[in-house]
Image (tube, rainbow, N blue to C red):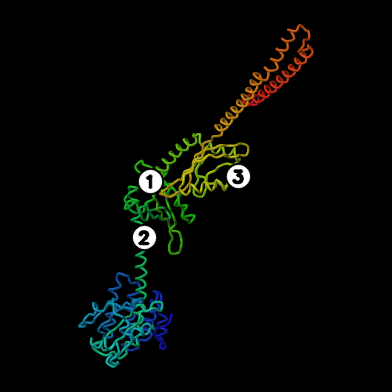
Amino acid sequence: MINLFQSDISDESLNNSLDLLSKSELLEFIIQLRKSNAEKAFQSSYENEIQDLYVEILDAFIDIKLEDADLELNTSLKKLGNFFGAARIFIFDINPATGFASISFEWCAEGTSSQFNSLKNIPCRNFPEWYDAHKRGEIYYVPDITSLNDNNSIKRGFSKEGIKSVFSVPLMNDGQLIGFVGIDFIRQFNTGALAQEKLPTVIAKMLVNLKNRIYAISEIKGKERFLADLMENSGSVTYIKKLDGTYVRVNKTWEEVTGHPRENVIGRTDFDLFEEGIAKQFRQNDLQVMQENKKIIIEEILLVNNNLKHFISVKFPTYDAKGLVIGMAGMSTEITELKRVESFLREQEAHLNAILNSSLESIWSINSNYEITFVNNILYEDFLRAFGKELKKGVCIIDLLPEILREYWKEKYAYVLKGEVLDFNEKVLGESEVFYLNIRMFPVIVDEEVVGVAVFSRNLTKQILAIEERDAHFDTIEKQNQILKEIAWMQSHQVRAPLARMLGLINLYNDSNGEDDAFFSNEKVLKSIRESAHELDEIIKHISEKTYLSDQIIAPSTQQN
């Protein structure tokens, strides 16, 4: 701590030493003043008086409450003004962003008119000499305004008010000008006594510290107010507890949900307010938050008037200024209705699944990423039998298909994802079976947006095979009938000719009584009979072959049945 009263102290070292004027520094400062008074009893009356004034003013600001700041500041400035014979002491705030100054405090000696209401939003550039000096962190002191050049802004602005001397100290915060403390002299010229003293500079530093305290506390209170309003007006049940589980604060939603007024809650625990099982649940979750020093999101229940309520709770630890856990806070949102709706939807889903799984059709659906969202039992079994793979929710259905089918089916799904409908028949070659399917594909639309595809497939394999078998049987019968027609024709035409000849020759032979005549010899007749017999035999053999062929056509069909 620099000794403010050593003879060689400079204004620059004073400014630097007071950049952070803390409570401990003020105490040390006062101790030095009192020690100086004790050691310098021989000093002049003026010196004793000024040091007494130092101690008196600084003493008042050590533990000053913010609500007493204005009153104490007025008292101190009055003492300072009376001591130096000032007409007016004022404090200006400067907005660094705009460069405008406005008076925020004023003390006037008796007989001096107030300028408080007129000194608002003044452009600092109207007084460049003053403003530039303060921006450099320098005191601005004019012992005799009348001695200034007529073009000087200070002379133009102050001489008409009868001001004879001006003394002003900048208020600097982190090297930035935020205001100044000024002292006017009207009745007499100040010949420099004030400029020799350090007290105005010390007070300026104290004012900066005080402003920072006010700003910091105001900011904290603003944040506290914001958080309090946010908590109070939250639709969630919100609460703060200490380490021992006692409530520090609850909001009106907490009161409405639990039925407990907050005045009966603060300082009490969950075991004082709720049934033991419910309280144990809350305490266990709170302890987890505080012991593990982490946020948790968990479902909790609360029994209110024999009605079970469900909540989703976000719980997190609270800390002191040193970062130590001092309790926990939580926000619990009631989800009772949501749980009821979830239960209803699960029940409806179970009914729907039962219906879909009892269908004779294969039914499935995918999302826009081709991932399976539903598969009924019949498709699951058919797909497993056909391709040896299980259809599971969340799996890309394209990846489960044989490589040769993937692009084909991806095009089908992509077409329907554009909002179109497909209805077609498909022959699918499985690993060991052939499937004949009728497939209908529909877009799944939510809020006018296609989000997936629903597919219904009828297995027509049995019907198709039955039709094919029927057609094959009809073809067999047709072929057999054709052969039978040929046999009938042969019997009606080819067999009759040699047989008729044979009958005629036999009659001729019988009529000749075995004797030759002029036209036929018996030998010739017998030869013709033999030829006709051979011809008939060939025809009969041909008919036998046709009959055997007809039997062979029918036999496979009979064996299949």
Depth check: give the residue in front, 36 or 262: 262
Numbered circle sitting on residue 300: none
Q: Amino acid at mark 2?
A: Leu
- C-alpha gap between disc 3 and disc 1: 61 Å
Looking at the image, is 250 positioned above or below residue 134? above
| Residue position marked by numbered label 2 in the rendering | 227
| Identity of the residue furthest to the right in this view | 523
Q: Is residue 526 left or right of residue 227?
A: right
Q: Which residue is mark 1?
A: 274
Badge 2 marks a residue whose secondary structure is helix
Quadrant showing the N terminus = bottom left
Which quadrant of the figure has residue 504? top right
Residue type, mark 3 in image: Pro
Q: CA distance from mark 2 to mark 3?
A: 60 Å
Going from N to C along the chain, the mark reached first, 1 or 2, is 2
Judge depth for marks 3 and 1 and give the one in front.
3
Classify 10 Å Cα crowding around label 2: few (below 14), some (14-19), many (20 and above).
Answer: few
Q: Residue at x 32, y 70 (%)?
A: 66
Is 36 placed above or below 431 here?
A: below
Asked where in the image residue 388 lies, by quadrant, the reply is top right
Q: Is residue 404 left or right of residue 187?
A: right
Residues 509 and 92: in front is 509
Report the side of 499 relative to 86 (left or right): right
Q: Position of residue 485 (x, y in %)?
A: 62, 22
Given residues 58 and 314, the one toward you in this image is 314
Q: Which residue is mark 3?
A: 402
